[in-house]
Amino acid sequence: MIKSSIIVISAATLRSFNYIFELQKAGITIEEVCLLDSELPLPGKREIDNSGAMYLKIVELCKINNITLSSHESDVNSKSLFQKLKKLHSELIVYSGFGGQIIKTPLLSLEKLFLHIHPGSLPKYRGSTTIYYSILNQDECGVTAILLDKNIDTGMIVGKKNFTLSNNMSDIDFDIDICFRTELLIDVVTHYINKGCFEINLPQDLHKGMNYYIAHPVLRHIAKMRKV
């Protein structure tokens, strides 16, 4: 397996677009972007983040930067994606698929590492929209890089970062969350490419932390008002 380049599994989202843009800007070689087809918006998500327009923007970004791109159905566990990943040479896969999807055994059985940037400090904050719960509980946000396993947010920790929140909290999902996750992603991948390994490898204590579920709109509003 090659450690000097990476693969990106990309949903048609603003976060995925930002990941690809910043990775190539940092000089990291992307062997291929595996782009998942558009999916219906999840609860609490704005239409723009799941639109066909974003799909086309990612296609154009790859074209401009001469990044090889392949298209696949929205299900990350599809047969076409499995067959494609088997043929690619890079060891590290940056996973930026649609929220709520879990990578299953066939993909995890490949000799590859699936890197996910989780918007919460693990093991304390597992699950969905954890950035909101972190803000409500602690007035701060931790972001964690993990290698995916068969369970939800329980994989090996390979990077961590805490961020101080600004006074402008109006757009947590499409500004703060994406910015924090992208910053840690670039740090972790750059170290991996340059050193051939991750800076840290910390197994999680599965007896610590708890699972959170999609934050109610009222909780989201309260979180946004914390810094106003």
Image (spheres, rainbow, N blue to C red):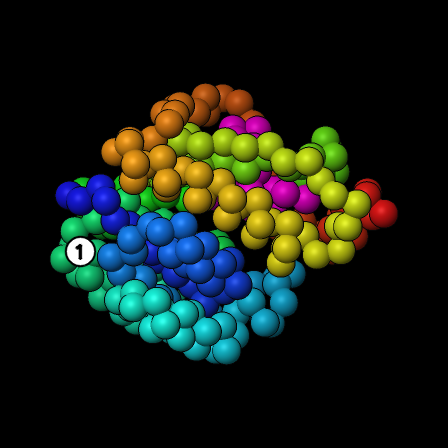
Task: Report the residue at 53% width, 23% height from top.
Answer: 208
Q: Is residue 214 above or below residue 74?
A: above
Determine whether, in the image, residue 139 is placed left or right of residue 113: right
In the displayed structure image, the side of residue 58 where residue 47 appears, left or right: right
Label 1 crowd bin: few (<14), some (14–19), many (20+), radius 10 Å: some
Residue 31 lies, in percent from the top left, at 24, 57
Going by the image, does 12 lie left or right of 93?
Answer: right
Residue 108 located left or right of residue 103: left
Above or below, comparing residue 160 to residue 60 in the picture = above
> With respect to residue 44, does 105 lie above or below?
above
The magenta-colored residue range is: 117-132
Residue 157 is a magenta residue: no
Q: Amino acid at mark 1?
A: Leu
The residue tagged with tag 1: helix, strand or loop? loop
| Residue 36, position as x, y percentages in the image | 37, 67
Q: Which one is in front, 88 or 214? A: 88
Location of residue 45 in the rendering, given as x and y in whole percent from the top left corner: 61, 63
The picture quadrant where one finds residue 217 is bottom right
> Where does the N terminus fall, quadrant-wise?
top left
Instruction: Determine if residue 49 is in view.
Output: yes
In front: 195, or 205? Answer: 195
**Could you tell me how many numbered marks the image carries?**
1
* Residue 128 sits inside the magenta stretch: yes
Mark yes or no: residue 153 visible.
no
Using the image as rendered, state which of residue 191 and residue 76 is in the foreground: 191
Q: Residue at x 68, y 44 (%)?
A: 132
Residue beneath disc 1 = 88
Say if 148 sits above or below 12 in the image.
above
Write the residue at 41% across / 70% down.
61
Residue 111 x %, y % = 18, 42
